[in-house]
Amino acid sequence: MSYSRFAIYYVPPEGPLEQFGAHWLGWDVVRGREAPQPDLPDLDDVTMTPRKYGFHGTLKPPFRMTEDLTIEDLTVAVFELASRLAPASCNGLTLTTLGRFLALTPTGDVEGLRGVAAACVRDLDAFRAPPNEAELVRRRSARLSPRQDALLTEWGYPYVMDEFRFHMTLTGRLPKGDIPAWTEAVQYHLPSLPEPFVMDQIALCGERADGRFELLHRYALIG
């Protein structure tokens, strides 16, 4: 199968949290297939935006591959990167409102998570084709700060390095008045969240012809 873009994600290991995310969003990124959602009014619409990506935390945002490198080159590079990186951890995860969407975010010291993400962005940058003008215009329409615009120019995405905030998205943008009800719904369906939260692996994912991402390979952090 050919892929239009690639990304480095944190995808939870198989278990209650991974299964919750797949069924909540309606897309199983691990198995590359649809998953039945809970019977909640409007859940399909609320999760439409994040569904294509699957349940994950972004480490290196989706990128188009440069023409002179191959997926085989990329898999070797991700393996070598993971072999140099040590696992990272924080106190746990919690349900948070970010802007107007809901996500799981880390609690406690997040510098280790930030370091893993920074390494993924920096050390795999040779594989990223530069964004085209349309992509730059779309990103800049979000009223980026000067720092975010500089990061966009250097790394192809504005929310990396010191602007990075690890999160696992659960909804699209919600009307402000709907946030409490959807927060309650998520909390009802959430399994017990890990304490501590340990990131001991990263995942290479690819965007299929139908626009949905699927897991290609997991890599243990053994540095």
Image (cartoon, helix red, strand yellow):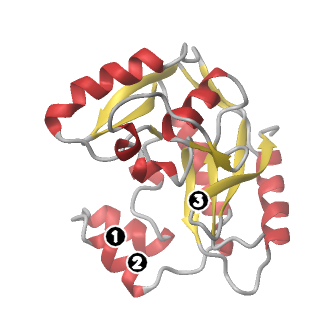
In front: label 3 or label 2:
3
Quarter of the view holding residue 135: bottom left
Instruction: Tell me which amino acid carries mark 2.
Output: Glu
Q: CA distance from mark 3 to mark 2?
A: 19 Å
Is residue 112 something that shows in the picture? no
Q: Which residue is mark 1?
A: 139
Q: Is residue 159 above or below residue 130?
A: above
Instruction: Kindly state the secondary structure of the residue where label 1 is placed.
Output: helix
Give x and y (percent) for residue 12. Answer: 65, 33
Q: Which residue is mark 2?
A: 135
Point 67% across, 64% down: residue: 124
For the C terminus, the image quarter is: top right
Give x and y (percent) for residue 55. Answer: 56, 41
Instruction: Tell me which amino acid carries mark 1.
Output: Arg
Please report whichever mark, 3 or 1, sits nearer to the chain's N-terminal start.
1
Q: Which residue is mark 3?
A: 212
Q: Is residue 140 above or below residue 165?
A: below
Give x and y (percent) for residue 160. Answer: 46, 55
Q: CA distance from mark 2 to mark 1?
A: 6 Å
Quarter of the view holding residue 165: top left
Query: Which of these two is toward me, 214 or 130?
Result: 214
Badge 3 density bin: few <14, some 14–19, many ≥20, Cα 10 Å: many
**C-beta proximity under 8 Å, tags 2 and 1:** yes
In front: label 3 or label 1:
3
Please report whichever mark, 3 or 2, sits nearer to the chain's N-terminal start.
2
Give x and y (percent) for residue 24. Answer: 50, 33
Instruction: Kindly state the secondary structure of the residue where label 2 is placed.
Output: helix
Query: Which of these two is toward me, 193 or 50?
Result: 50
